[in-house]
Structures are given as structure tokens and as C-alpha cells.
Image (cartoon, rainbow, N blue to C red):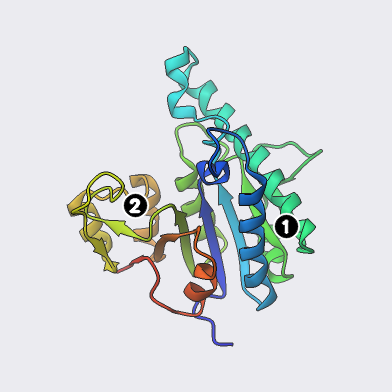
Amino acid sequence: MQLKYKRILLKLSGESLMGEQQFGIDASMLHHYANQIKVLVDVGVQVAVVIGGGNIFRGLSASKSGIERVQGDYMGMLATVINGMALQSALEGNGIYTRLISAIEMKQIAEPYIRRRAIRHLEKGRVVIFSAGTGSPYFTTDSAAALRANEINADVILKGTRVDGIYSADPEKDPTATKFDTLTYTKVISLGLGVMDMTAFTLCQENNIPIVVFDINVHENLMRIVRGESIGTLVEG
């Protein structure tokens, strides 16, 4: 099988794990993602995953409850570790070898981040789940995804969302919003489109890592993208 992308970084939001719930983890969503990732691994794609923690705790909203920003960000990082453990369990239940890697040392449950070791895991066909963001406050999991994608020399960042690409406005709120099939980095900035936070986006732009924004809830989308089909919105150049 011809593959356009052989090493990918899949970015999932924590909210995507909620399913129809208001918070927490929906087991059916875990299995949905595990099944999609398994299909990729079975054809030889090297898969790394960065998952957010917004279904459990969002650091940016911590100040509303009186929690200091830095403390709130660390709490959000720990939430990503919980989600990473859940995804790891679902993947291993599907017979996929995984490694959970944390940017904050917690050796009882996750490996510390060592770049060469992470790349070696990918080369051996293991799914690598990067958790705890960058390990520092003030950085989102988008920034962590962009950073890790650069460090492991990923071919592309696949950002799974609830909509089928990038639109001129929020399609869930504005019925006149139009979808873009392709965009340049410059165009995204000039139009003020919220693909990723600017730190993450600039990192991808400077190192020419393409970003595909797509609907993660549609079966076969991941496989179709790695085969080179035009799914979602491609940002490059």
C-alpha cells in the first residue's frame, strides 16, 4: 500500500473523549480512537499521539475558580496523563504495543521524555503517547504537539476535531461559513483562523510541517489521509 505519510503525530482534544457526556471519558470514544489507530499501525504507519485534558481540567479556566495560572496549567498537564493512560489501555486491549511518555517525571506510570528513545519506540512499531504537555506552564497541548512533531521528525500533524476541516467561521454557529480545502500558513494568519495557538502554528510554519485538520469521528478518515486522499483541510507552504 502506498502511504503519503509514514510517521504521523495525531492531536486529539480531551473534549473529544467526552462523547455525549458533559465531562470525563466515554468508553465508546476510546475504543473508536483505538480502532482507528490500530488500522494505521497494521499497515506500518508510525503513530505518535498528543491528547489534551479539557474533559477533566482546563488550565486556562482555572483562574475562574481562584486557582493560580501556573498551578492550573500543571493540573491540566496531569489531566492529559490520565487521558493518556486511558488511551494506552484501550490500545493495548486491541493488541497494540504502546509507550506512555510524560514530560513531567512520574516513573511509576510513564517513561520520561527522551527524544531518541521515543523515536526508537516508533521505529519498533509502538504507538507513543506524549502526555503532560511540554512540562512547562503557559504552553497548550497544541504547542506540545507541534514541538514533539518537530522533535520526532513527523511527516504531518493530523488534528482531529468535530468538524470536517477549517472554515471561514464556526460552522456550528454560522451556516454561511465556507470550508477551505487547502491553506498556506500566511493565509491562516492573515484571516485570523484558529487552527492552533500561535506558538504551535509558528513552530510548524518555521519547520515546514504540514497540518491536516479533519473530522476524527468519521471512520476511515485517518487511513484515507495517510494514503494521500484530500480529507479535511491541509495547511502547508
Q: Measuring 51% from the left and 41% from the top, which residue is drawn there?
A: 15
Give the farthest residue toward the bottom. 1
Image quarter (top left, top right, bottom left or bottom right) of the C terminus: bottom left
Q: CA distance from mark 1 to mark 2?
A: 27 Å
| 80 lies above or below 193 | above
Q: Measuring 49% from the left and 75% from the top, which residue is drawn there?
A: 224
- Numbered disc total: 2
Instruction: Tell whether 111 sits left or right of 144.
Output: right
Residue 224, labelled with which disc?
Answer: none
Which comes before the other along the chain, label 1 or label 2? Answer: 1
x and y percentages locating residue 146 in the rendered image: 46, 54
x and y percentages locating residue 81 in the rendered image: 66, 39
Which of the 4 image quadrants contains residue 2? bottom right
Which of the 4 image quadrants contains residue 19? top right
User: Which dot, 1 or 2, sits closer to the camera?
Assistant: 1
Residue hosting label 1: 91
Residue hosting label 2: 195
Tag 2: amino acid? Val
- Assess disc 2: are there few (<14), some (14-19) or many (≥20) residues with their C-alpha within 10 Å of its C-alpha: many
Instruction: Tell whether 49 sits left or right of 123.
Output: left
Of the pair 29 and 102, the residue shown nearer to us: 29
x and y percentages locating residue 128 in the rendered image: 67, 57
Of the pair 23 and 137, the residue shown nearer to us: 23
Instruction: Tell whether 101 sits left or right of 60.
Output: right
